[in-house]
Image (cartoon, helix red, strand yellow):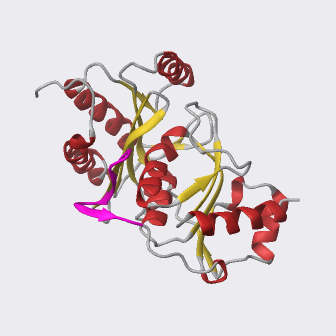
Amino acid sequence: MSQRQNPTAADLDTLGGLLRDAARRHILPHAADPRARLKDDGSWVTDADLAMQRHLQDRLAALWPGVELLGEEMSPRRQAELMAAEAADPQGSGLWVLDPLDGTSNFAAGLPAFGPALAWVQGGKVRLGLVLDVMRDELFSAALGHGARLDARPLRCPRAPAMARAIACVDFKRLPHALAARLATAPPYASQRSLGSVALDWCWVAAGRFHLYLHGAQGLWDYAAGSLILAEAGGGAQTLDGEPVFDNSLRKRSALAALDDALLRDWAAWVDGASR
């Protein structure tokens, strides 16, 4: 393979091919027997997660040897070292941020919503993002300032409905109890879902399959790629505190999102009121 300096928007097809090839080699063959086990932090891991991370780390290093990879299946200490180095060198080559198999619990249970998520973070910004829905064979991708795509087609958020007619994707277990109770008993939307894959949650909002989104705490590797895809598709997002979701750190971040900024304002105002 020829080596490149830094990744660019023109490399999205190459990166998408790497994700698809890795998934064919390491996810699909394990789908019938995932052999899931619990990590020390209580989350699930499988042989497919570990094999995907090793495979993609090798392939990405061959193409972009100057770009380090921060993967979910690394030790917290190594993740922190890599994030600190990136933040200290905004003119450097940045970092790949990888969730090798987002939705591992779905994968382990046989629920067909999971896949790898890959982002390139450089200079304090998410510049490239890709999410592969393995079972649907859908590749979502985006480059900062260049728009988003679903496979080869441009991806734009459709027109937003009124909040009362919206479909919301809500992860209840990580929300403050008062807010979760209010959502369960008097929601402002028409219906609610929970997909079980944060990376795909973001992408499905971008595609208009969900109109609203709410999650209480997600890791950088969960949201980096998907949040860029939604932003480049025209959607809006913020934390429960009204901050940008991405803050160039490893801190867990809450997320509210919607198809456009107007619907996001209505959604954020309702959530804020319900949280008091």
Residue depicted at 32% across the width and 49% down the height: 146
Report the front residue among 112 and 247: 247
Magenta-colored span: 143-156
Q: Position of residue 229 (x, y in %)?
A: 42, 53
Whether the magenta-drawn stretch holds residue 172 is answered as: no
Report the front residue among 35 and 149: 149
Report the side of 44 relative to 27 (left or right). Answer: right
Report the side of 4 relative to 56 (left or right). Answer: left
Q: Position of residue 51 (x, y in %)?
A: 32, 37
Quarter where residue 164 is shown: bottom right
Q: Looking at the rendering, in which quadrant would you find the N terminus?
A: top left
- Picture layout, residue 31 above or below residue 15: below
Residue depicted at 46% across the width and 16% down the height: 89
Report the front residue among 193 and 207: 207
Q: Position of residue 204 (x, y in %)?
A: 45, 65
- Picture layout, residue 43 above or below residue 137: above
Whether the magenta-drawn stretch holds residue 153 is answered as: yes
- Picture layout, residue 212 above or below residue 105: below
